[in-house]
Image: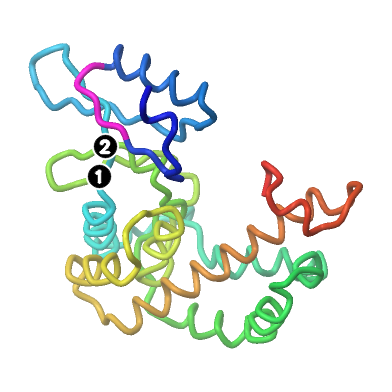
Amino acid sequence: QQGTGTKAAVVVGVSCNPQTFARDARVLIDAGFSLERVTPVDQFLWSAHVEPGDVNGLFAAAALGRFAAGEVPRVPWLSQRLLSTRVAMAEERGGWTTLSRTTAADLADALWRRRRSLLERYDSLPQVLSHGDAVPSNLIAQSGHDVVALDWASLGTAPAGADLGYFALSSREDFGVLLRTFVQAHGGDEEEIGFAARVMAVMTVVSQAEWALSRVASGEGALAAKFRHPSV
């Protein structure tokens, strides 16, 4: 209850009892916080006891690095060129037109003009296994030295570092630390992996900002007043 007065933007709770965790979470929710995810941890094997917890970002980065170093199966259904496809969809809609009306217009324009050269280099890098949607809510638990992952609909190939860039957008850890952890586990070239991760992160977050703003841009009021809209 004392925590309801905090000015912290993010609260991470670890509880030994799901029932008391639910009780305490309700207090925070009633105070205005939103519950993003809960991860049960089967810490006590051969018992019915579980603990809610979270997957550490560095642990996840290492697991993603090992996964990217794995052998790519020869199957026809693996997705390919996901990032280029997403940007091509934006091209069909005329580009990032909503962002051109914001204070990020110069940044978005510079990035948009460089998109093809960035994506050409990005797609020319060696292709490795990629989860395709490596967000914390899909990396739900630890299993030994591995992470249990959900939602494999985008499984395919991408440059080493693509999953890291996508994960970094939602991670609390510093990007440089995540990158070094990923590289150590993967064993690849840090410059190439860092480039791929940054391109994935920047192109994704700008595309998501454009998509979110475009959903509310046509309503009444100035666009700047909608930056804090729930969908944005």
Q: Residue at x 78, y 59 (%)?
A: 224
The front one of 22 and 170 is 22
User: Residue 159: x, y in percent?
Assistant: 40, 72
Does residue 210 sit above or below 5 in this rendering?
Answer: below
CB contact under 8 Å: marks 2 and 1: yes
| Left or right of residue 79, residue 162 in this image | left
**Residue 140, how many percent across, how many down?**
32, 37
Q: Amino acid at mark 1?
A: Val
**Residue 195 figure quarter:** bottom left
The kind of residue tagged 2 is Ala
SS state under label 1: strand
Colour basis:
rainbow
State left or right for residue 88 relative to residue 123.
Answer: right
* Image coordinates for residue 102, horizontal then vertical, percent: 76, 68
Judge by depth and name the residue closer to the eye, 158 or 207. 207
State the residue position of label 2: 141
Q: From what the image shows, is residue 19 above or below residue 209?
A: above
Q: What residue would you read off at disc 1? A: 147
User: Tag count in the figure?
Assistant: 2
At x 19% / y 46%, what residue is drawn? 146
Cα–Cα gap, marks 2 and 1: 6 Å
Quadrant location of the N terminus? top left
For marks 2 and 1, the one nearer the N-term is 2
Residue interval drawn in magenta: 13-17
Q: Main secondary structure of the magenta part?
A: loop
10 Å crowding of disc 1: few (<14), some (14-19), many (20+):
many
